[in-house]
Image (tube, grey):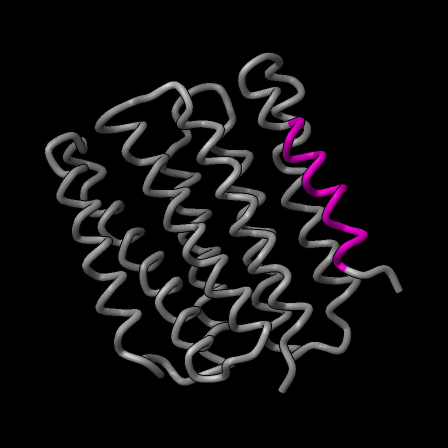
Amino acid sequence: MPSAAAWWPWVASVAALAIVGAYTAPWLHYLCKPAATLLIAAMVLRLGAAAEPGYRRAIFVGLLLSTAGDVFLMLPGDWFVFGLASFLCAHVAYLVGLCRRARPFAAAWPFLAYAALAGSVLYVLWPHLPGELRIPVIVYVAVLAAMAAQAAAVWRARADPAGAAAALGGACFVLSDATLAIDRFAAPFAAAQALVLVSYWAAQWWIGRSATLARS
């Protein structure tokens, strides 16, 4: 059976093409952005047969919901709320899976740390957010922070490779979404899209990788 090392070059290559397409060729971006996430989902199916079934299913569902979010966020027009809702559901799926590996709040410090970080990001964004987006963004940030914190708590509680991979993925997701939000609403900058996408696929890769490593 191919190892994760055999999947990584394919994921990285397709993700790189998506990033290049974002700056030069929209059709390439439209093709490769969802394809990169689906490749990670395929890896979870292919390599995760021996992993914890409930955790693997939750991560796979989260990756499919993330693919829907990929599509919404790259469509012409303003589909931001639909993309936000898709990724919100993806984080809920990841959170459900992570709670199967360790009880919620298995360690307190990740929740305190991510709560402080989430509050800081909201503080920066708040003056720039349209009124109708404030509640959805608060809910999204809270769920994202809870997912990342639970991933770190699982790593602290179980100290296994799957926990470490998920914790790294959660941290990368926070970086990606914070960059996206700041670029969109507060302080746009030229390199934002590349940073968002690189950290996004790093997040999905490590979360997906955790589903292939998790053992009961």
Where's residue 1, x and y in %?
A: 89, 65
Q: From this view, report whether residue 102 is shown above or below residue 127.
A: below
Q: Quadrant of the C terminus?
A: bottom right
Q: Majority secondary structure of the magenta segment? A: helix
Q: Which residues are magenta?
A: 4-17
Q: Quadrant of residue 55?
A: bottom right
Where's residue 88, x and y in %?
A: 40, 52
Q: From this view, report whether residue 136 is shown above or below residue 146.
A: above
Q: Is residue 113 rendered to the left or right of residue 161? A: left
Q: Residue at x 61, y 20 (%)?
A: 21
Where's residue 106, x and y in %?
A: 35, 83
Q: Quadrant of residue 4?
A: bottom right
Q: From this view, report whether residue 106 is shown above or below residue 74.
A: below
Where's residue 148, x and y in %?
A: 39, 62
* Numbered-mark total: 0
Q: Residue at x 68, y 40 (%)?
A: 12
Q: Residue at x 31, y 51 (%)?
A: 140
Q: Residue at x 51, y 25 (%)?
A: 75
